[in-house]
Each structure stands twice: as C-alpha cells, then as structure tokens.
Image (spheres, rainbow, N blue to C red):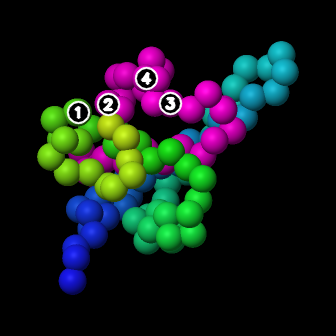
C-alpha cells in the first residue's frame, strides 16, 4: 500500500486563508485551522484551492504533498505562484507547531 505524504503533516498547523476584496475596500483577511483529514477530504472532492508548503525550498524539494507549490513564508507576497483571484481558497501547511 502506498503511503500518503499527508501522514507527515501535523494537522494542527494547516490553515486556510480566505481573501475577499470589494471595490474601494482593503482586503478582509480570514483564516481557520483545519485537520489533515479535513484537508484530505477537500482534496478527494477536488476542491478548487492552492495548496502551499510554507517551508524553506530545500525541505519542499525533499518531501511535499503532491500538487502543492513551495512558497516560503517570507516570499508569499511576491511569489508569482500566488493566485490573482483574491477569492481563491489557499491552504498553507508546514511540519507543525514549533
């Protein structure tokens, strides 16, 4: 049986970032923490989301969740991988609480 890379992710640190922008108003930021099983269910249902590994690139290169992109936290604002659509669901993950 093939092992899922999700088992290496500590579920407590998964966060969903929602950005909603209306005309003339700055972005309203909302987030919540989800568990690994919740993320797996979303992935299984084909949720339209961007999955982001927020760890340094060297760690992303060693192991990451299939379909995710590697964007270290310090580069989130400038990364071309971030969606232009501010309403898109973005899920950030790392190895867990420090």
Residue 30 — which label?
Answer: none
The first of marks 2 and 3 along the sequence is 2
**Residues tagged 4 and 2 counted as in contact (Cβ below 8 A):** no
**Residues tagged 1 and 4 counted as in contact (Cβ below 8 A):** no
Separation (CA) of disc 1 from disc 4: 14 Å
Separation (CA) of disc 4 from disc 2: 9 Å
Q: Circle 1 is placed at which residue position?
A: 56
Q: Residue placed at 59% from the left, 59% from the top?
A: 47
The first of marks 3 and 1 along the sequence is 1
Range of magenta residues: 71-98
Instruction: Give coordinates of residue 31: x percent, y percent.
Output: 57, 44
**Residues tagged 2 and 1 counted as in contact (Cβ below 8 A):** yes
Q: Circle 4 is placed at which residue position?
A: 79
Separation (CA) of disc 2 from disc 1: 5 Å
Q: Circle 3 is placed at which residue position?
A: 82
**Residues tagged 3 and 1 counted as in contact (Cβ below 8 A):** no
In the image, 42: left or right of 93? right
Instruction: Classify residue 20 by image quadrant.
Output: top right
Separation (CA) of disc 3 from disc 4: 6 Å
Seen from the viewer's position, the closer of residues 19 and 80 is: 80
């Amino acid at each position: 049986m093939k092992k899922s890379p999700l088992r290496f992710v500590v579920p407590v640190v998964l966060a969903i970032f929602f950005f909603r922008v209306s005309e003339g108003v700055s972005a309203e930021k909302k987030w919540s923490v989800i568990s690994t099983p919740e993320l797996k269910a979303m992935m299984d249902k084909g949720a339209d989301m961007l999955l982001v590994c927020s760890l340094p690139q060297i760690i992303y290169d060693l192991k990451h969740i299939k379909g995710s992109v590697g964007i270290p936290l310090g580069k989130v604002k400038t990364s071309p991988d971030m969606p232009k659509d501010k309403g898109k669901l973005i899920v950030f993950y790392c190895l867990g609480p420090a």
